[in-house]
Image (spheres, grey):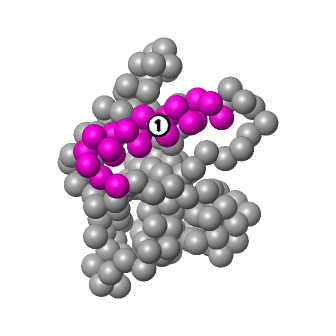
Amino acid sequence: MRVIGVDPGIVVTGFGIIDKNNNNIVAHSYGTVKPPKNMHLSDRLGYLYDEISILLDKYKPNMLAVEDTFYSKNFKSAMSLGQARGAIILAGYSAKISCVEYSPKKVKKSVVGNGNASKEQVQYMVKNILQLDQLPSPFDSSDALAIGLCYLNQNQVE
């Protein structure tokens, strides 16, 4: 089973590829997608769609796990984040890969045991669970790995 976790963002989107065979869980790859800063919103969304599509084609995951939009006081930020999520989910649909969504609290609770955990706590637990040599950085990629782990934890995948 291979899952790609995605932490959507209009400025930085994190991704993490995790493989699970029996009880062996391994981080295959992780990183970020950063649309050029001078792009208009529609071009940024297209860029995200294209780059996520490339990752899906390259790594061929069985499942796409995306962090759900959290409610923000800043309506414009929440709208942009929702649009980024839409571009990512559409990339999964186009690649015929099923998508699941998890709230930030559910991801944190699944990985750390505390739905109010800090980004540092999530990063630390991701490093330990996946037995990485160093903390996955930036937070966007450690959050994406946590989203993938949440899927594996929630679905008891073999």
Kind of residue sitting beneath label 1? Gly
Residue 63 in the image: state x and y as whole percent: 34, 59
Q: Is residue 66 placed above or below 74 in the rendered structure? A: below
Residue 83 in the image: state x and y as whole percent: 52, 32
Residue 105, picture quadrant: bottom right
Q: Is residue 46 placed above or below 1 in the rendered structure? A: above
Name, please, the residue furthest toward the bottom.
Answer: 23
Whether residue 127 appears in this view of the structure is: no
Q: Nearer the viewer, residue 130 or 144?
A: 144
Q: Is residue 146 left or right of residue 121?
A: left
Residues in magenta, as a range: 78-98
Quadrant for the N terminus in the image:
bottom left
Query: In the image, what residue occupies the spot 58% across and 29% down?
Result: 80
Residue 94 colored in magenta in the image: yes
Quadrant for the C terminus in the image:
bottom left
Q: Is residue 41 left or right of residue 52?
A: right
Q: Is residue 62 placed above or below 56 in the rendered structure? A: below
Residue 46, picture quadrant: top left
Q: Nearer the viewer, residue 110 or 29?
A: 110
Residue 35 colored in magenta in the image: no
Q: Identify the residue under disc 1.
A: 86
Q: Nearer the viewer, residue 101 or 24?
A: 101
Residue 128 in the image: state x and y as whole percent: 50, 74
Q: Is residue 58 placed above or below 147 in the rendered structure? A: above
Name, please, the residue furthest toward the right.
Answer: 73
Query: In the image, what residue occupies the spot 37% across and 38% down?
Result: 90
Residue 49 in the image: state x and y as whole percent: 36, 33
